[in-house]
Image: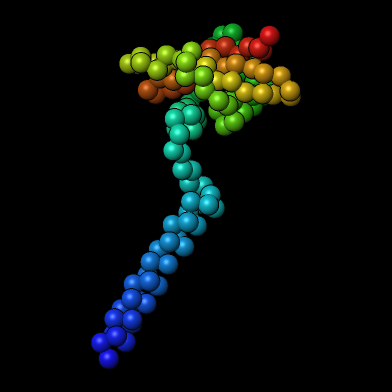
Amino acid sequence: MAFLRRLGWYLVGLSIGIVFLVFFLKKKSGESGIDFCYFPNCRVLKDMRSKPLVFSGAIGKTAKDSLMVRSFLTDGNIDFGKSDTKSEWCKTYFVENEIDGEDWILEVKSCKQEVKIETVEKVK
């Protein structure tokens, strides 16, 4: 009788754990729009996507330019070796991305309230 009671409590705990795990993995799968970022590159790009964009005078505000910048902020790779990550107010990042078979570099200043897009250059 004691064995059946322990088995019953074990199965109750196991079923609660499985239900919790199913809900957790369902959220993690991206159906609800939650993005889990564990690596520094992903965390910095996610932080920049959450702030409003401000374009410098050197960059046009056309739809093509803003779409290009959005592709940098979703698919780009940050070169932390060239970037200034120690600054207090505005950190400067160099984001690399390949667009239409060509390599591009985006210079971004990530401030506390906004993201300033400085330059977009094609790598030679």
Most extreme residue toward the left, as rendered? 2
**Relative to the observer, which residue lies in front, 11 or 116?**
11
Residue 5, placed above or below residue 43 = below
Query: Residue drawn 66% across and 23% down?
Result: 98
Q: Is residue 119 left or right of residue 115?
A: right
Q: Is residue 95 left or right of residue 103?
A: left
**Relative to the observer, which residue lies in front, 16 or 108?**
16
Query: Residue drawn 44% across and 30% down?
Result: 40
Quadrant where the C terminus is found in the figure:
top right
Residue 91, placed above or below residue 22 = above
The percent coordinates of residue 109 (x first, y second) are 46, 16
Query: Residue drawn 48% across and 51% down?
Result: 28
Q: Which image quarter: residue 84?
A: top left
The percent coordinates of residue 103 (x first, y second) are 67, 18
Query: Residue drawn 50% across and 57% down?
Result: 26
Is residue 50 visible in this depiction of the protein? no
